[in-house]
């Protein structure tokens, strides 16, 4: 323990009274005195020191708590950052996958377009072939039609020829019989009437046949 | 009252808290604080090798995990006890309460384990009462919760 001389004790007491400056810290615990005034001074200094220490302790504890909270928040932030980075990494991986898929899709589309172009070419070829086939078909139909017409015309001409032969034949025979009757000087009343009738009928039939043939021909031409 | 205490802790703010708490509770007259176990080990080595240990602390409080040090608090206690001649009351002051770590500390020669918290004064008060037992090596290892 330390003992101060009386003069020092008094000076310290005066300093405390005039400027409230006193001893601080654990040194106070090491000083002893027989002077009651100085003992009182030491007690005041001790109380003051304890007050200031208590205040400082409270403040430092608060700061410690705040630091601890900040540290926890920092840890949470770091965790969040790690989570975010992990999510970002996953997103980037997904992006790479999607890009790869996109690449595959683009390749597939290009291939598809090529196939489409080939298909279009084939379709054009097919269309051309179809047109050609249709043309061939039309030509064949036309040829068939022409052939039919030709046959029809030949048939008609045969019919007409035969009919005309018959008409002319009947006319000749009737005229021959009439001429024979005239030459022979026989009664021509019945034969003349019959000849004129038969001739009229033959002419009418002849014109009728010609007219029918012309009509059929005209109608067939219009249909085409 | 303990003559001198050495605190080894990487947290500067805790140095202030510990100093003020010790002063208010009249635990010690003198307190020295270090930030790393390496510094503390060097000091003990110096005291041990020189044989001059006048300024050697009477009691040492060591944090368990000391950031910036090459070894932890338990290893420092082991060094103090088994390499540098002991003669101090030494223990852990940490926020950890792991029985496994406490068992390791006992093996290293720690005499006490004080759990750090916002309200450390009651534990220091209790420690102060038990201190003579640690000094005489009569008290077994104790955890102050």
Image (spheres, coloured by chain):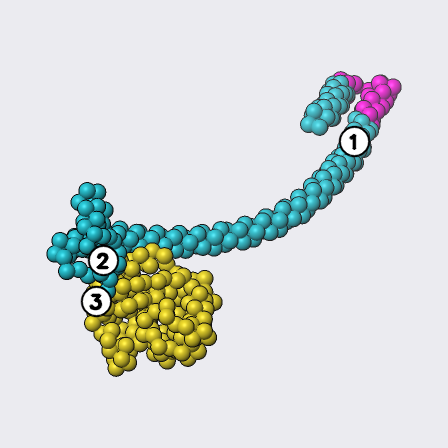
Chain colours: A cyan, B yellow
Q: Specify the subunit that label 2 lies on.
A: A
Q: Residue tagged by mark 1?
A: A153
Inspect the magenta stretch and tell me whether residue A178 lies in it: yes
| Mark nearer the viewer, 1 or 3 | 3
| Residue in the picture at 42% in, 54% down | A78
Q: Give the CA separation, mark 2 to mark 3.
A: 31 Å
| Residue in the picture at 87% in, 19% down | A183
Farthest-out residue, left: A36
Inspect the magenta stretch and tell me whether residue B110 lies in it: no
Q: Give the CA separation, mark 1 to mark 3.
A: 142 Å
For mark 3, give the secondary structure.
helix
Q: Specify the subunit that label 3 lies on.
A: B
For mark 1, give the secondary structure.
helix
Q: Residue tagged by mark 3?
A: B125
Left or right for B79, reference A98:
left
Residues in magenta?
A168-192
Between residues A194 and B44, which one lies in front from this camera angle?
Answer: B44
Whether callout 2 and callout 3 share a subunit is answered: no
Quarter of the image where one finds residue B86:
bottom left
Count of numbered labels shown in the rendering = 3
Q: At which x and y percent is residue A4?
A: 22, 57
Q: Which quadrant of the figure contains the N terminus of chain B?
A: bottom left
For mark 2, give the secondary structure.
loop
Answer whether labels 2 and 1 touch (C-beta < 8 Å).
no
Q: At which x and y percent is residue B35?
A: 40, 61
Q: Residue tagged by mark 2?
A: A4
| Mark nearer the viewer, 2 or 1 | 2
| Residue in the picture at 42% in, 64% down | B36
């Amino acid at each position: 323990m330390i003992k101060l001389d009386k003069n020092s004790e008094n000076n310290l007491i005066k300093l405390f009274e005039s400027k409230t400056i006193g001893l601080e810290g654990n040194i106070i615990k090491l000083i002893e005195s027989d002077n009651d005034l100085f003992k009182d001074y030491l007690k005041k200094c001790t109380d003051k020191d304890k007050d200031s220490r208590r205040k400082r302790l409270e403040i430092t504890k608060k700061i410690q708590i705040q630091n601890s909270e900040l540290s926890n928040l920092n840890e949470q932030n770091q965790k969040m950052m790690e989570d975010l980075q992990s999510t970002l990494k996953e997103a980037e991986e997904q992006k790479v996958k999607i890009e790869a898929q996109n690449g595959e899709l683009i390749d597939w589309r290009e291939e598809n377009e090529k196939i489409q172009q080939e298909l279009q070419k084939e379709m054009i070829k097919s269309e051309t072939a179809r047109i050609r086939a249709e043309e061939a078909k039309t030509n064949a139909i036309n040829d068939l039609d022409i052939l039919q017409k030709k046959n029809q015309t030949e048939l008609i001409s045969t019919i007409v020829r035969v009919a005309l032969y018959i008409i002319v034949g009947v006319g000749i025979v009737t005229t021959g019989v009439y001429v024979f009757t005239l030459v022979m000087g026989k009664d021509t009343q019945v034969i003349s009437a019959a000849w004129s009738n038969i001739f009229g009928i033959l002419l009418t039939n002849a014109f009728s046949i010609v007219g029918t043939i012309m009509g059929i021909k005209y109608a067939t031409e219009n249909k085409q | 009252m303990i003559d001198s205490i050495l605190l080894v802790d990487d947290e500067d703010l805790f140095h202030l808290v510990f100093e003020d708490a010790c002063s208010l509770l009249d635990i010690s007259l003198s307190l020295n604080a270090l930030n790393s176990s390496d510094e503390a080990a060097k000091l003990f080595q110096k005291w041990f090798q020189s044989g001059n240990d006048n300024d050697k602390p009477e009691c040492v409080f060591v944090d368990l995990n000391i950031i910036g040090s090459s070894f932890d608090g338990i290893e420092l206690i082991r060094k103090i006890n088994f390499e540098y001649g002991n003669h101090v009351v030494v223990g852990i002051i940490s926020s950890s309460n792991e029985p496994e770590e406490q068992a390791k500390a006992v093996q290293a020669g720690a005499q006490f384990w004080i759990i750090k918290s916002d309200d450390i004064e009651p534990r220091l008060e209790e420690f102060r009462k038990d201190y003579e037992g640690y000094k005489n090596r009569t008290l077994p290892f104790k955890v102050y919760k």
